Amino acid sequence: MRDVLVEVRDLDVYYYNIKVLSKVSFQVYKGEVYALVGESGCGKTTTANAILRILPEIARVGEQSVINYYLENGDCINLLKMPEKKFSREIRWREISMVFQGAQNSLNPTLKVKTHFFETAASHGIMDKEEVYRRAYELLEAVKLDAERVLNSYPIELSGGMKQRVIIALALFLNPRFVILDEPTTALDVLVQREIISLLMELKKQFDLTYMLITHDIALVADIADRVAIMYAGRIVEESSVENIFYDPKHPYTIALLNSVPKIGDFEKLPEGLPGSPPDFKNLPRGCPFHPRCKYAMEICRKLEPSLIEMGDRRIACHLYAEEVSEE
Amino acid sequence: MSENVIEARNIVVRFYISTSFLKRRAFNAVDNVSLEIKEGSIVGLVGESGSGKTTLGKVTLDLLKPYKGDVLFRGKSIYKMSKEEYLKYRLNAQYIPQDPYGSINMFKRVGEALLDIVMYHHLAPDRKEAMEIVRSVMNSVGLTPPDRYLNKYPFQLSGGERQRLSIARALILKPAYIVADEPTTMLDASLKANLVKTLRDMVKDLGLSLLYITHELTLLQYFGPDTEVAIMYLGKILEKGTIKDIMLDPIHPYTKALLAAIPVPDPKERYTRKIMLKGPAPSPLNRPKGCVLSDRCPFAEPICKKEEPLLNEISPNREVACHLFG
Amino acid sequence: MRVVNFSYSGRASWAKLAIKVIKRSPAALMSIFILSLYIAASIAVVIGLVPPLPPARGGWQNIYRPPSLQDFPWYILGTDFTGRPLFLAIVRGAPSALLIAFLSALITVTIGTLLGLASGYIGGIVDTILSTIIGVALVIPTYLLSLILVIILPDELKTNPFVLAATLSITSWASLARAVRSQTLSLKKRDFIDVARTLGFSSFKIMFGEIFRYMAPFVAMSLILSMTGAIYGYTGLAFLGLMPMTSDNWGVQIFAAIRAGGALFSDRAILALWSPIIVIVLLQYSLINIARVMEEILNPQLRLELLGEE
């Protein structure tokens, strides 16, 4: 029986009055790479922000939502119900941390790299600069950087790949057990992407980490994920092992996503884009949110939203398969 | 044999970096590169950050002056043109920059920005006809219905819509040559495909030439197997050929490394791909002597570190700069 | 630089915007109200709705008289040390203050913006020369210079509003020029400037049609804030006794009250001393508040957020 590390149940998130996440539920097992996949705006980053409790001020989490986290000693705590002070002292960055997208300006351009580490440490009560420097040095070496040089550089002196490595080192600073990777390779050159991914997998083994990967890059998912959840319009529409998702995709959106990846040798035949436009959360269609763009939409899809149901070793929210399940 | 709309000859672009108070060092972001773009064709310029691809693109648009070398528009050097000739070149050479956020004036509404171009160059006798032109360009790039977008500010548009606006802006003068710099890098996978399709149709319908700068080699496939491609690294072109040849039969070790690194959407492949090049790319200030790849190439021989290999045509339409092949 | 307006809901938006702004900040509402009062007063004086000051009358019973309802409303603050109605004198001081302030601000902002744009965009030798000029202007003690200029100016010129405005803004454009220059330098690097160049726009059009657009809110704010500086300069010079002793100048009124009217020595002079001061401060306060609100109104991104569009 695999150990659950994080359990998200019925997560609802509202921005002002608009529901951007709807009953999102999943579990992440210890030691795995769990991927949340979807296009911009589908809610994957919002989910990650909810776990780390860094949602913007305008966000509200539903009353029934639960995010359970299992500590090393086996205790289970509901992260959503923890007081903020306790959460930021004990959980954020200590148990759970995040690797941000390097292309976003996550590093303060006016501070040297070592100052970033000092500030992170100070906000968690660690004031001994020498100790912080030593630990930062260790981590930067672990991410294969010239620690001495990088520590004394400003972010603008570093290349995209180097910045991403610094962000990884910062995320590992307090020895977390669960790390959320938010688009860790977007906007990086292809050779650098390969190196960063290799590095992340090495670090995972070295530090016994569990990863939640957030990305819109399907190929990246094929590369490192163990289990995959596909999100659309703030909901999980399909979830299964990476092999199932790639070799036997069931949900029409999953199939469409897979078809949109360019493959080598595909001259002239463009990958099929999806017709229609991305969902407008202020005006979601009745029934299944995907039906306006779905090749296989049926009458019932326009009326009733399919719930996420278990079908063997996967979960799927689609009326095409509802009958299969009830027949079992 | 079609003519070259743009030809870059032996371009050297030199940048200076201040290393300390009074000292500065020079490096060649583009080092003796030549490129030809024929009328009505698409050329892909592939490379990673620091390869000089954007710099080269900007030189062909006269946004940067090269230290050495020449750029010809339909056979005439742009540095020796008369005012009328230059104006003709200027209106015929347009730019679609990479970042959809910084490349559009956020304080101008969509309709206003496009109308401005038409009116400034007197392309229409009155405002009504000018708006017709604006509407028709918006339709052709997929910003339909135009009325939905005319009043909006760029920050109200999604990433994909902003890129389309960039394209519309480049097309409105009906240029013969467009440089598109990583137009899809900031977009999701499904949007990438749509944008490439739009550009491809544009080229076909309007007969214009496109210099498509990217680090994503696979996207170039969709312009057709005979699309010409040049691979750049640290300011030099290492390989030239059609996309089909390059993808199915790469020759230069750098090209092979690029192809090996392209992620494949197949879980079975995850343990078969290797990193072929040693170490990270050096800073442009520290380019290795001899061949630019010599410090990282798995096949480097002693000669590679001493002598720079020149681009060699090893078969029709196929050039490689490598000591192993020529 | 043409502003082409596509907004179909133009008028409705501005009204909604005004209401939103007012709801958010009562201080802004008050400031707008106060400023309108001043403007109304100025207009009233200029078109002759306000009676001229009666001749001065000395004598213990006439000076610093307490407020009365006589000749409403001109005696509601009583009289000043010349026996003339205080409130009337103050109202009559409004147009010159506003005019000089506005003119001076206009000169400051125009020169500052032009030099900053040219210096930042054109670069090269032009930038070097202009930056040196800006640097020198920044270092000159503005107030001393204005002082000296005002002293050496012949009286006829001293009362000319344009000349006065120019004197007051002789170096105040410099810090705006520097700010505009640095904004221009950073905007110059953005891709949309490259595109403007490939689109064949002239440098002039790029500076004023593209770059200036980004700075318009900042410049508008600077305009209003410059007015506050000019007002201080203007009334300050008068307070130091350097301006012709006309009675329609708040600074002169304070000066006169203290120097000639012994205001510091008599309780009865409180109103005469403090009224001009309060009137000045109130104007400054309103201007500053309005400047703050300007940023929200003029920046389209903030404006649209305010209106609740996405």
Image: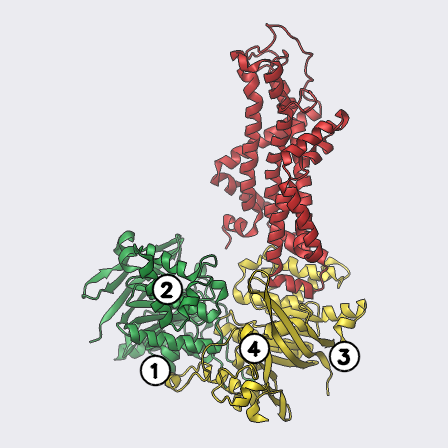
Chain colours: A green, B yellow, C red
User: With respect to residue A247, does C126 lie above or below?
Assistant: above
Q: CA distance from mark 3 to mark 1?
A: 55 Å
Dot 3: within a 10 Å radius of its alpha carbon, few (fewer than 14), some, or many (20 or more) residues? few
Instruction: Specify the amino acid type for callout 2.
Output: Leu
Q: Which residue is mark 2?
A: A170
Q: How many marks?
A: 4
Dot 1: within a 10 Å radius of its alpha carbon, few (fewer than 14), some, or many (20 or more) residues? some
Mark 2 chain: A
Q: Which tag is nearer the camera, tag 3 or tag 1?
A: 3
User: With respect to residue C252, does C302 lie above or below?
Assistant: below
Front residue of this view, candidates B94 and C46? B94
Q: Where residue A14 sits: x, y (%)?
A: 37, 56
Location of residue A35 (image quadrant): bottom left
Q: Which residue is mark 4?
A: B234
Q: CA distance from mark 2 to mark 4?
A: 30 Å
Q: Secondary structure at mark 2?
A: helix
Q: CA distance from mark 4 to mark 3?
A: 28 Å
Front residue of this view, candidates C159 and A119? A119
Q: Which residue is mark 3?
A: B75
